[in-house]
């Protein structure tokens, strides 16, 4: 088997025993990136030299008999929403083009301390807003299974690079489905852990009550390996949970006998592609054969998930993105026509009349934001600002918070009678690039099965459960109660022992 086709578990074991050097491992993936990323556009930055230096240092330590970290030599790609000191962090926005954070995200630090090798930063929808990667300021990512289609989003680069064997593991973030949906559309495995399970410090904030970082890999076993390193309390993130981190990898092999899986009838309603429905139904049959029992459950407020999410997320985004004002960091508009001094130096105040701005400072803010943000980010900021404004706050934001509580309660009730809920990740397989860009509502509806997990703060995992007749992956989603990651991973792992969908690889032009 070629190096790039090996699982993360195998690669880490091979480096530990010395069967494979960290250098050979990292070189193989860098070579694969150089060979195929021209077709996919999954990476916004590749850290070739530093990655090879790190790999050489790991090999040196091994040769000297010194201890190695738990992920020694494992190449990892990181979504460009996570801060890295050695590579720019742009969130795929012109606003942050070239921005170098002064610190590493906690997750990046944990990976580095475990001797994982960060090979690059992955493309995404701008500020993680989108479900197709077409909102990137640096061009869309292409789905490795069909280059004319979207990989999903917003962690589309992370999903596509794993699907195309450019990294064995990638880190994504999920606010309303951005790990699970692209994983589903690219035929890989993606875990959105419970809110607070992984520190968000150094993750560029989109919607802080929903954002969660998670692993994306070819299998549940590889996700478990990475989760063990990146999960855990961080005093630097007030929302991070103090609960002990279980040994996810050691819990994978327990049998599924007696597992109760919920099936939600409304998951199979209008809008669901028949090939997706069939793949998901077959997955239920596989779980039953593995000893699980299937039970009908209801999520009565699930239909309100999309409107609730698309109020709460833009409200929080409008507040979080207020920091991009051109003054502190990020893009700053050039003074008007070059005639004015840079705004903020306090010297050259011009009359308000020019351009209708109250002051040169306000003009600088407005121009910087107008130039730096793309159209979808602006739409969200406007929606959120409107919904939070006096007079509309109660009608929109406060109401959405109340509905969010009902959605949370639905899950709590459902999880009294079942251990997990299974269903589709997305209503359709990967759609064509450009198909939904003119219709934001159609794009938002893609998230109908994923936003509930974030609104409830619980865990979800997605992985392939079949292919369409035209060869596109079909994703299955399992949702579980708070801190059910061991069970989510175990159920997905058992399924992957019984099936081969996750082994299939796309054929890319060389
Ligand atoms: N597609 C959703 C959105 O556009 C989810 C994004 C995410 O999870 N970051 O908001």
Image (cartoon, helix red, strand yellow):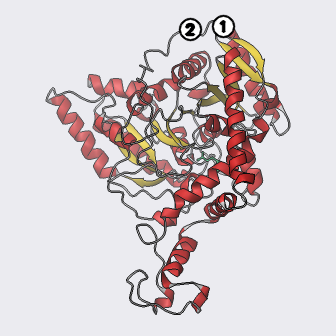
The residue lying at 58 percent from left, 20 percent from top is 496
For the question of whether residue 345 can be seen, the reply is: yes
Could you say where residue 455 lies in the image, as x and y percent from the top left?
Answer: 64, 38
Element under label 2? loop
Q: Are marks 1 and 2 in contact (CB under 8 Å)?
A: yes
Would you say the beta carbon of the disc 1 residue lies within 8 angstroms of ligand 1?
no
Q: Which mark is residue 291?
A: 1
* Position of residue 276 in the picture relative to residue 253 (left or right): right
Task: Provide residue 130's location: percent of width, then percent of height.
Answer: 63, 52
Q: Is residue 173 left or right of residue 427?
A: left
Tell me which label, 1 or 2, sits earlier in the chain. Answer: 2
Name the residue located 76 percent from the left edge and 29 percent from the top edge: 299
435 relative to 213, above or below = below
Q: Nearer the viewer, residue 114 or 324?
A: 324
Say whether residue 319 is left or right of residue 287.
left
In this view, which residue lies farthest toward the left? 64
Instruction: Say if disc 2 is inside 8 Å of ligand 1.
Output: no
- State the CA–CA distance, disc 1 to disc 2: 8 Å
The residue under the point 77% across, 58% down is 439
Q: Which residue is mark 2?
A: 255
Q: Is residue 366 above or below residue 51?
A: below
In-front residue for pair 81/346: 346
Q: Position of residue 392 (x, y in %)?
A: 72, 58
């Amino acid at each position: 088997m070629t190096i790039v086709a090996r699982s993360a578990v195998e690669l880490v074991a091979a480096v530990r025993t010395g069967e494979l050097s960290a250098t050979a491992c990292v070189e193989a993936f860098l070579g694969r990136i150089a060979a195929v990323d021209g077709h996919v556009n999954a990476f916004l930055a590749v850290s070739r030299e530093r990655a090879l230096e790190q790999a050489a240092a790991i090999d040196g330590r091994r040769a000297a008999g010194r201890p190695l970290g738990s992920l020694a030599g494992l190449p990892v790609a990181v979504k460009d929403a996570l801060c890295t000191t050695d590579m720019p962090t742009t969130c795929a926005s012109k606003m942050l083009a070239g921005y170098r954070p002064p610190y590493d995200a906690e997750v990046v630090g944990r990976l580095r301390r475990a001797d994982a090798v960060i090979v690059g930063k992955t493309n995404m929808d701008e500020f993680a807003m989108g479900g197709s990667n077409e909102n990137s300021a640096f061009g869309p990512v292409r789905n490795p299974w069909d280059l004319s289609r979207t990989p999903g989003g917003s962690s589309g680069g992370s999903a596509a690079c794993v699907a195309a064997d450019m990294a064995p593991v990638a880190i994504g973030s999920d606010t309303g489905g951005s790990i699970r949906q692209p994983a589903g559309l690219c035929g890989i495995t993606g875990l959105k852990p419970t809110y607070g399970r992984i520190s968000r410090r150094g993750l560029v904030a989109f919607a802080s009550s929903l954002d969660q970082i998670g692993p994306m890999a070819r299998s549940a076993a590889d996700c478990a390996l990475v989760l063990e390193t990146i999960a855990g309390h961080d005093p630097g993130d007030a929302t991070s949970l103090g609960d002990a981190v279980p040994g996810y990898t050691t819990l994978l092999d327990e049998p599924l006998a007696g597992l109760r899986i919920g099936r939600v009838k409304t998951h199979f309603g209008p809008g669901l592609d028949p090939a997706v429905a069939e793949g998901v139904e077959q997955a239920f049959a596989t779980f039953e054969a593995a000893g699980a029992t299937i039970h009908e459950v209801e999520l009565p407020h699930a239909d309100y998930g999309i409107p609730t999410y698309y109020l709460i997320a833009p409200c929080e985004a409008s507040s979080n993105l207020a920091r991009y004002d051109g003054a502190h960091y990020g893009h700053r508009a050039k003074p008007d026509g070059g005639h004015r001094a840079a705004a903020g130096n306090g010297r050259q105040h011009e009359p308000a009349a020019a351009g209708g701005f109250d002051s040169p400072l306000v003009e600088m803010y407005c121009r910087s934001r107008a130039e730096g943000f793309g159209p979808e980010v602006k739409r969200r900021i406007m929606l959120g600002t409107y919904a939070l404004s006096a007079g509309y706050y109660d009608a929109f934001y406060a109401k959405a918070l109340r509905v969010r509580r009902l959605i949370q309660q639905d899950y709590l009730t459902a999880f009294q009678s079942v251990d997990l809920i299974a269903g589709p990740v997305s209503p359709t397989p990967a759609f064509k690039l450009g198909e939904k860009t003119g219709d934001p509502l159609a794009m938002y509806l893609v998230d109908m099965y994923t936003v509930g997990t974030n609104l409830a703060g619980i865990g979800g995992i997605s992985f392939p459960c079949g292919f369409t007749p035209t060869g596109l992956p079909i994703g299955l989603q399992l949702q579980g109660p708070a801190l059910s990651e061991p069970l989510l991973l175990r159920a997905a792992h058992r399924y992957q022992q019984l099936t081969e969908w996750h082994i299939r690889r796309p054929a890319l032009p060389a």
